Image: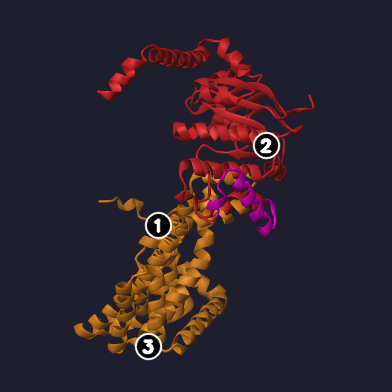
């Protein structure tokens, strides 16, 4: 057994820290919360305004661009129809709004941070363990404080999703930049590229396949997390799953689960296909 | 002295894992750098000058420091000690902005591994240096197409480098260097990765280009054949030091030490064998024909 004399607990100080944050910076969290909610609602109203066949059409076009094959295009465009038939279309749109908002924020924050990681070694060394923690920490551990700080509902769901979905795009952006072949970079430097020109003209374009793989991973993680986030009051397909579990209604849970899987497959195939189109080595 | 384009004196380059404050006077330090596995003295007390319009060859085995030396001329690696003057400008003390400006206007480099951008077309690759300088799009494309025509690739401008052969890629590399219109051309084993026939062709191409443009060319190779064919003068490097400088025929006739002699020996051997074979063929033509028939 571990000797009792060494017992040391941080639980209490963490509790106090959260309490202190709430009491002293509560209003700051509130306004931050309002900003995210505003963005989320705007995305949602935009999504609701599009008719259902608009989605099918959009998916078909994107799938065609991504795969250039007829059968995958038909399958990908046809799958979402099942979501509608299950009567889950409106809930799926709410989930989609949550995913899009989280992913957009994750990319806006994550890609620049990934670039800084590749450029500054010290920053990368500090960031890596933080990213490990973000990915391995059981999500319920930060769901509860997120709820305490940002209130019940969608905003803490976005925050929790961000925590979970941000690491892949950061890591893959950094990795992609580091893997750009040295001779190409040296040639660009030899012709007088500044650090910024090197980044903009050479490193980021050549790292694009890796960055897009990061976007794909982040989107998938966000979709997975959105379901868990329903436990703190985010509506959408996750809530449907949660309710079905509570009532031991296996069939209903299955329908909602399949709908999430369908969203996952469609988003994954399209983003992966687009990433492959972008690969400079395929030209 | 005014017509010396490159003037290098007492140049040292040390690669080290640790930060070091290099000092030539400190012999103990140099000794410890030599014996340490964390550091390599890649260029050791090198001095030479290159005249305007000259093709200057640096020859040596791999690891002799010749690639590091050519990188010192553009300061692609930091200079540990000594002076590098190009067109009268001291390279080693330039700040970031000055060195960027210098690279854009004074010297263009051709690389062994081409260093082409895979996501840009051939014409965009050639125009890349001009783009960095801020030449307007239309103008730089036009200049790039002209440069492509001088290397015989006028029809390949819209292809991506991946669809070109090695020889063609290096032509693109040369076009990129020519279009920069710099007085100095640096070439780091440009033809080493090419097969012998293409290499020969490219060497002839370079001779033709030199007749047209009269550049000052600093050319690194490990191939004595190439050095003799292209060079006005050559330097032989060994373990970071220059062991001999002279016109290629002089070096060939009077190697300064065993190392140079071994380079030359191989070449002499080759010439002797070729001569013998030719002689054998000349004296026994009937037999050769008979063998062919049977």
Judged left or right of residue A148, residue A192 is: right
Tell me where residue B113 appears, x and y as whole percent.
50, 40
| Residue at left offset 53%, top offset 32% | B189
Q: Report the quarter where the C terminus of chain B lies.
A: top left
Q: Is residue A107 above or below residue A27?
A: above
Q: Colour of chain A?
A: orange
In-front residue for pair B30/B10: B10
Same chain, marks 3 and 2? Answer: no
| Residue at left offset 36%, top offset 68% | A67
Count of number-bearing discs:
3
B150 falls in the magenta region: yes
Q: Colour of chain B?
A: red
Sequence-first disc among 1 and 3? 3
Can residue A194 be seen in this snapshot? no
Q: Write down the region rendered in magenta.
A: B132-157
Q: Is residue B278 above or below residue A94?
A: above
B22 falls in the magenta region: no
| Residue at left offset 71%, top offset 37% | B183
Numbered mark located on residue A132 in the image? 1
């Amino acid at each position: 057994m571990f000797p009792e004399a060494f017992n040391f607990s941080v639980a209490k100080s963490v509790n106090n820290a959260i309490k202190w944050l709430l009491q002293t910076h509560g209003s700051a969290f509130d306004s931050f919360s309002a900003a995210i909610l505003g963005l989320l609602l705007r995305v949602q109203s935009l999504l609701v305004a599009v008719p259902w066949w608009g989605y099918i059409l959009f998916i078909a076009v994107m799938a065609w661009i991504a795969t250039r094959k007829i059968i995958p295009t038909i399958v990908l465009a046809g799958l979402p129809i099942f979501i509608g038939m299950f009567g889950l279309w409106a809930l799926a749109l709410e989930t989609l709004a949550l995913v899009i908002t989280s992913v957009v924020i994750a990319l806006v924050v994550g890609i620049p941070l990934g670039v800084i990681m590749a450029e500054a070694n010290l920053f990368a060394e500090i960031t890596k363990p933080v990213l490990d923690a973000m990915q391995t920490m059981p999500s319920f551990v930060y769901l509860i404080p997120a709820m305490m700080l940002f209130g019940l509902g969608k905003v803490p769901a976005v925050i929790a999703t961000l925590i979970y979905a941000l690491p892949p795009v950061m890591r893959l952006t950094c990795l992609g930049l580091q893997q750009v072949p040295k001779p190409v970079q040296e040639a660009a430097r030899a012709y007088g590229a500044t650090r910024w020109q090197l980044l903009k003209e050479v490193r980021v374009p050549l790292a694009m396949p890796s960055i897009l793989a990061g976007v794909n991973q982040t989107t998938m993680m966000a979709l997975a997390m959105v379901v868990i986030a329903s436990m703190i009051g985010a509506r959408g397909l996750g809530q449907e799953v949660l309710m079905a579990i509570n009532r031991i209604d296996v069939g209903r849970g299955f329908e909602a689960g399949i709908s999430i899987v369908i969203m996952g497959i469609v988003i994954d195939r399209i983003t992966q296909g687009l990433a492959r189109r972008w690969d400079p080595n395929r030209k | 002295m005014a017509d010396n384009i490159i003037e290098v004196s007492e140049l040292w380059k040390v690669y080290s894992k640790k930060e070091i404050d290099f000092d030539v006077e400190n012999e103990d330090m140099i000794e410890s750098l030599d014996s340490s596995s964390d550091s390599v003295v890649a260029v050791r007390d090198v001095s030479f000058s290159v005249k305007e319009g000259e093709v200057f060859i640096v020859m040596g085995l791999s690891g002799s420091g010749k690639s590091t030396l050519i990188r010192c001329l553009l300061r692609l690696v930091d200079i540990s000690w000594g002076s590098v003057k190009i067109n009268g400008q001291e390279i080693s003390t330039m700040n970031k902005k000055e060195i960027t400006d210098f690279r854009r206007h004074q010297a263009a480099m051709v690389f062994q591994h081409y260093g082409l951008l895979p996501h840009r077309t051939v014409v965009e690759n050639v125009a890349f240096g001009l783009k960095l300088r801020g030449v307007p799009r239309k103008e730089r494309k036009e200049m790039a197409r002209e440069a492509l025509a001088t290397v015989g690739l006028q029809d390949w401008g819209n292809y991506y480098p991946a669809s070109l052969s090695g020889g063609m890629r290096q032509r693109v590399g040369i076009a990129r260097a020519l279009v920069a219109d710099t007085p100095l051309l640096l070439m780091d084993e440009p033809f080493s990765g090419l097969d012998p026939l293409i290499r020969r062709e490219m060497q002839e191409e370079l001779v033709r280009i030199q007749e047209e443009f009269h550049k000052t060319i600093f050319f690194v190779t490990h191939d004595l054949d190439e050095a003799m064919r292209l060079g006005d003068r050559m330097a032989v490097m060994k373990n970071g030091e220059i062991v001999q400088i002279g016109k290629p025929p002089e070096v060939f006739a009077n190697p300064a030490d065993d190392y140079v002699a071994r380079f030359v020996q191989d070449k002499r051997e080759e010439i002797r064998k070729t001569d013998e074979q030719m002689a054998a063929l000349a004296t026994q033509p009937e037999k050769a024909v008979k063998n062919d028939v049977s």
